[in-house]
Amino acid sequence: MYDIIIIGGGPAGLTATIYAIRKRLNVLMVAEDLGGKTNFQMDLRDKDQHLVIRGTEVVEKFKRELEYLNFARHMENVERIDRANDHFVIKTAAGGELLAKTVIVATGARVQWLDVPGEQQFRGKGLGYSALSYAPLFLEKKAVVVGKGELALRSAAELATVAEEVHLVGPSGALLATPLGKKLLSSKNVTVMEGYRVTQVLGNGFCDAVMVEGPQGFETEIEADGVFVEMAVIPNSEMVAHMVERDVRGRIIVDSVGRTNVPGLFAAGDVTTTTEQVLVAIGEGAKAALSAYEYLLPSL
């Protein structure tokens, strides 16, 4: 039986695993891959990438260390986690079972795709899913934000502080009545396209335009230096949905140190209610590992 099993190999999971190893715990990280969302970076044509604070240097360091430590990782998906008396049973996709005294769920979240022609071709090439990470690159540039929810509004507002022009495609009237919505409607460099939807992603090597369709069926092409799809991510929390408290979006509810409502079960990163940023996930992974260590300390 392991002292701790970490589910997920993204920024939070990698950090938690390294911290647990440094605490000399008997640890295993179970994940489909190493690096998580940091494996999918967005490149832009002729942009100074050094302006982006990614956190990838830390993630890559931890990733290389885990690639070397074969005994501390198991590359497979987890289907379900159950509590059994004083320990947890982790059921893997292949039908195996792993036992642990504590568990950290750091499975991240998956983005929602547009599912339109050109999206797959230009994904990562001028087309991204995190405007907050790349906003500094859009000084005096043009950007398109696609989404109907609060995330799209926040992304458009941040881009508007530096970009020459921002097109916000798809928000609803109710959302535009909020303080942030009203701010965007009154911003001189923001064009709000209520009721529009993207029908195609266009470009030559890199995405440089999108085709949008309005409520009346007319199509318009919008040129841009970058396009961001900003629809709420879907947390990968199904494996513990039967035992932990989650919010309306399915995110695992944790306290300030990564504890869930189940003793011995912790969570960190994008699968929780924390901010969806790499650097934040790194910190949350460290906190969850330290919390798990304190939980285990009396029995070590």
Image (cartoon, helix red, strand yellow):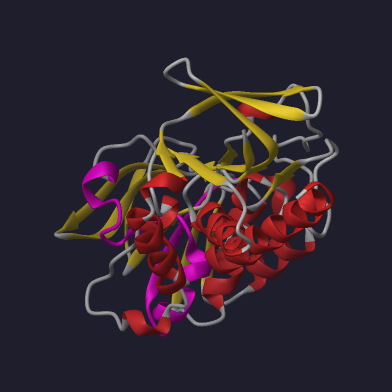
Q: Provide residue 60's location: percent of width, then percent of height.
A: 38, 66
> Does 41 sit left or right of 167 as displayed?
left
The answer to whether residue 147 is magenta is: yes
Q: Provide residue 75's location: percent of width, then percent of height.
A: 39, 37
**Residue 263 position (above or below residue 286):** above
Residue shown at 38% from the left, 72% from the top: 142
Q: Does any portion of residue 177 appear in the rendered image? A: no
Residue shown at 54% from the left, 75% from the top: 160
> Does 105 sit left or right of 203 as displayed?
right
Q: How many marks?
A: 0
Residue nearest the viewer, comparing 161 with 181: 161
Q: Residue furthest front?
A: 300
Q: Provide residue 216's location: percent of width, then percent of height.
A: 46, 36
Q: Residue furthest left?
A: 204
Q: Provide residue 112's location: percent of width, then percent of height.
A: 48, 39
Write down the quadrant of residue 154 in the picture.
bottom right
The answer to whether residue 164 is magenta is: no
- The boundaries of the magenta stretch are 119-148
Residue nearest the viewer, comparing 94 with 131: 94
Q: Quadrant of the N terminus?
A: top right
Q: Does any portion of residue 150 appear in the rendered image? A: yes
Residue shown at 29% from the left, 51% from the top: 123
**Residue 71 position (above or below residue 128):** above
Residue shown at 63% from the left, 58% from the top: 285
